[in-house]
Image (cartoon, rainbow, N blue to C red):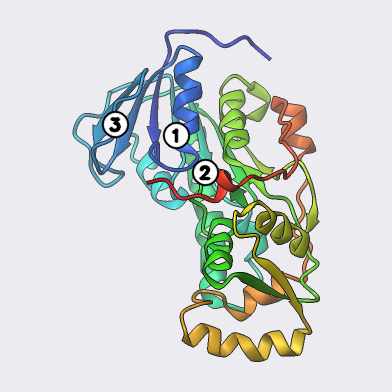
Amino acid sequence: MAAPRVGRTALVFGGSGQIGRPLLARLADAGWEARAVSRHAQPAAEGVRWLRGDLAGCHDLPAQVDAILSCGPLDAFAAWFARGEVACGRVVAFGSTSVEVKQASADAAERDVARRLREAEARLFEAAAARGIGATVLRPTLVYGVGRDATLTRIAALAQRLHGFALPADATGLRQPVHVDDLAAAAMACLDAGDAHAKAYALPGGESLAYREMVRRVLATLPSQPRLVVLPPPLFRALLAPARLAGLAAGFNDAALARMREDLVFDAAPAHRDFGYAPRPFVPDAAMFTPPA
């Protein structure tokens, strides 16, 4: 793998998000000059110039950069990139393992998510190939780390509110939670990895553990030490309907319940081989599930 060079420029979409912020910090540490796009004003950061706008419109975009990185919705980014508004030599974009996990879901909305991800990847690679640009898509698994994820941080908040958290006894499907900083490191490593061109990689965390054990570790970090309550599956399902009506399980559909029993495990070997991906095991602390002020 080639040694990184200083003095390069990057255009970053989603820089104010949970993956974008550690990525911007790593770019600055490596000597890159980053231009990051945000709809809202952002605090100054060393090595970062914030641009006001989004993928639908930003009038201060540079004509050319060394690399473009996207940490936001892949379908919107792929559509923007296909228009060819900014010249570059490298593209790294985050997608999701939902492209595989949800493609056969019983829920039509989830199948649509998988379809849009699949089409976005194809559109990005097609546009990059037509312009002679090396493009890579990174597919994280279950993201955590800075209190901004929609799964583990939500579980932590609900457990603290209710002084406990319930799961069905068969919630034993394997998961691989991945820390945001490991994802930022992967994106950085990809920038100089020629073997990663025109490829998509799963980025799981460094440990596979049962869903129930994952939740137990989250709860163990919380100051109030909420209890994990394991219920017989029929009883859990019976209690789920009133919990949804009370707003305690909003968005938790039958497909999500079924996935608790499924192993959602992905192979990190290709990412390790091509750009040295080496994620940490799941050893959480309370700060990882504390939303930023």
The Cα atoms of the two marked residues, 1 and 3, are separated by 11 Å
Q: Is residue 285 above or below residue 220?
A: above
Q: In this view, does 44 lie above or below 106?
A: above
Find numbered disc 2 in the image and state the secondary structure of the residue it sits on. Answer: loop
Determine crowd level at label 3: few under 14, some 14-19, many 20+ residues with C-alpha closer than 10 A: few
Residue kind at label 2, given as amino acid type: Val
Instruction: Report x, y in % for residue 57.
Output: 23, 43
Question: Which is nearer the eye, 226 or 116?
Answer: 226
Q: In this view, does 263 lie above or below 71?
A: below
Residue that label 3 marks: 43
Residue kind at label 3, given as amino acid type: Pro
Q: In which quarter of the image is residue 167?
A: bottom right
Picture disc at residue 146: 2
- Left or right, residue 237 beside residue 111: right
Find numbered disc 3 in the image and state the secondary structure of the residue it sits on. Answer: loop
Question: Which is nearer the eye, 163 or 140?
Answer: 163
